[in-house]
Amino acid sequence: MDHAPDAGARDIVDVHTHFVPNGWPDLGEGQPWLRPESEAEAMIMVGSTEFRRIQASCWDAEIRLAEMDADGVAVQVVSPTPVFFGYEQPRGEAEKVARIFNDLALEICAPGGGRLVPFCQVPLQDTDAACRELERAVAAGHRGVEIGNHVGDRDLDDEGIVTFLQHAAALDVPVFVHPWDMAESPRLSRWMAQWLTGMPAETHLSIIAMILGGVFDRVPESLRICFAHGGGSFAFWLGRFENAWHQRKDVIGTSQRPPSSYVGRFSVDSVVFDPAALRTLVEVLGVEQVMVGSDYPYPLGERPVGSVVHRADYLGEAERKLVLAGNARRFLG
């Protein structure tokens, strides 16, 4: 059965897309800057190093909206590209960068008529500054926040990050967690292995930190938090995690309850590309915890958006509608 959307139908909410502005003020030596290649193409530079070639779809709302229409996307969450997080910078510099990119995000999303939903970034290395910028950005029009999955060696169970998550919950602001700053080694420098193995591992590790670090025991159940890229490898290895918690409780029994008890406290996106992998997410985490993501407009993303959900013939129509849009609308409030 063909589950592709009807021509002109808009039945998808995409919670995982990124933007890059078409230029920004100088951020200082060694920081990201944009080298234009043409009117429709540019290179993100980090210092003197080429980071990523991008197209106008990163900043041009008209192009985004046309491609959303082609894929049947009603609403798109537009989040920062993690290279701009600036977590390694001093607080003042990182707060300045967050303000610049958050304000530019609002300009990029403004022509969308509500279809482009901006998520802000914050200087997560400093809790007070992060909470302050979250409040400012939300007051200015942002609907949520994207954070990296760690700050240096501080994972999501770090005291300051937990305080930030509690603040996001208090403000009723959804949080999207994206892996970034993956480990480097000669083995990981081949074949884009940082993206193929490092990103899933980073996300998996951060969900473990949320559980074993007691974060889910300390933040209210009202916290809406979603992990990118299907939650990494977490769903596949939950059984191993659960077994280890019971068999070596002396080492990892640091959460109030076994790991499986926290399934339902977080969501994941559908950026797994294979219906068999999506089935694992739905069966292990629950159909209400999975939302469409595409990683648009980057080349490792999914086009047409939601195709893995439409190819998942084991989903009933009610389940398919939840994954395509219903869960995301609840996540976005």
Image: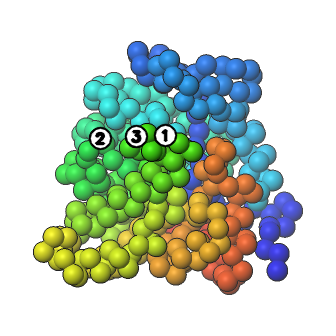
Which is nearer the N-term, disc 1 or disc 2?
A: 2
Secondary structure under the numbered disc 2 in the rendered image? loop
Secondary structure under the numbered disc 1 in the rendered image? loop
Placement of 105 over or under 192, stated as above or below: above
The outermost residue toward the right is: 7
Q: Amino acid at mark 3?
A: Glu
Marks 3/2: CA–CA distance: 13 Å
Q: Amino acid at mark 1?
A: Ser
The residue indicated by pointer 3 is: 184
Mark 3–mark 1 contact, CB under 8 Å?
A: yes
Secondary structure under the numbered disc 3 in the rendered image? loop
Which is nearer the N-term, disc 3 or disc 1?
A: 3
- List x then y, in percent, for residue 6: 84, 67
The outermost residue toward the left is: 250
- List x then y, in percent, for residue 239: 38, 79
Marks 1/2: CA–CA distance: 20 Å
Which of label 1 and label 2 is nearer to you? 1
The residue depicted at 40 percent of the width and 40 percent of the height is 184
The residue depicted at 51 percent of the width and 63 percent of the height is 230
Regarding residue 259, the answer to whether it shows in the image is yes
- Say which mark, if any, is on residue 189: 1
The residue indicated by pointer 2 is: 152
Which of label 3 and label 2 is nearer to you? 3
Marks 3/1: CA–CA distance: 7 Å
**Local crowd size for mark 3, using a 10 Å CA cut-off: few (<14), some (14–19), many (≥20):** few
Q: Is residue 257 left or right of residue 312?
A: left
- List x then y, in percent, for residue 325: 63, 67
